[in-house]
Amino acid sequence: MSLISTFSKFTLECGTDEAGRGCLAGPVTAAAVILPADFSSEILNDSKQLNKNQRNQLKIEIELNALAYAFSHVWPETIDQINILNASILAMHQAIEKLTVKPEFISVDGNRFKTFKNIPHETIVKGDGKYLNIAAASIIAKTERDSYMEKIHEEYPHYNWIQNKGYPTKEHRDALISFGPTPYHRQSFRLKPEQLKLDL
């Protein structure tokens, strides 16, 4: 199924999406992208449906062709203070704020958002698999966050963030048991298996 260009009839509609919401470590990263009306791509889709090479290829295409794009990281200490949902929305707001072109409408992946500067918006469940601008935002968010996780992997290689990107794989959980959390871990998340057990 080919993706639709935009949700609204506005010329300057931005799509926004986040990456890393379910991770135990690292930032939640959001991006916002305004594409030209004639933008097309044979492979652009939800970033989770693509391999690393495809995402990196698309990142270059999007950056070359977008009318505007931006991304923002929100760090673990903020996630711990305001919770992951609010941190995800904050990251989206920050990315939209950084756009060099002000959007007339915002299409949001998911079902939760807070109005940004009175710009009309729509939340769209699985929007990254329906609209090109949201899919483009998912690509920028995913590639920028992955790049960051690969950098901090060098500092803490035990957790293999170069592979799992901070998601709760068995390997990541085992490393937490063996080595404990790092400054990059989200302390408000259930980091170790014993935190999942109920006291009966």
Image (cartoon, helix red, strand yellow):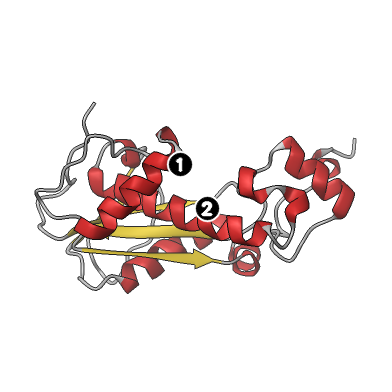
Mark 1 residue crowding within 10 angstroms, few (<14) / some (14–19) / many (20+):
some
Hey, which quadrant is residue 127 in on the image? top left
Please state which of residues 73 and 66 is positioned toward the viewer in this rendering: 66
Q: Mark 1 is on which residue type?
A: Lys
Mark 1 element type: helix
The quarter of the image holding the C terminus is top right
Mark 2 residue crowding within 10 angstroms, few (<14) / some (14–19) / many (20+):
many
Residue 52's label in the rendered image is 1
Please state if 179 lies on the left or on the right of 102 as rendered: right
Q: Is residue 163 above or below residue 183?
A: above
Please state which of residues 69 and 43 is positioned toward the viewer in this rendering: 43
Q: Residue at x 68, y 42 (%)?
A: 168
Residue 24 x/y as whole percent = 67, 51
Q: Is residue 61 above or below residue 187?
A: above
Q: Which residue is mark 2?
A: 146
Please state if 75 lies on the left or on the right of 29 as rendered: right
Mark 2 element type: helix
Residue 162's label in the rendered image is none
* Whether label 1 touches label 2, CB < 8 Å: yes
Q: Is residue 37 visible?
A: yes
Q: Residue at x 68, y 59 (%)?
A: 154
The quarter of the image holding the N terminus is top left
Residue 55 x/y as whole percent = 39, 44
Q: Residue at x 58, y 67 (%)?
A: 75
Q: Earlier in the sequence, mark 1 or mark 2?
A: 1
Q: Is residue 106 above or below residue 48?
A: below
Q: Mark 2 is on which residue type?
A: Asp
Hey, which quadrant is residue 118 in on the image? bottom left
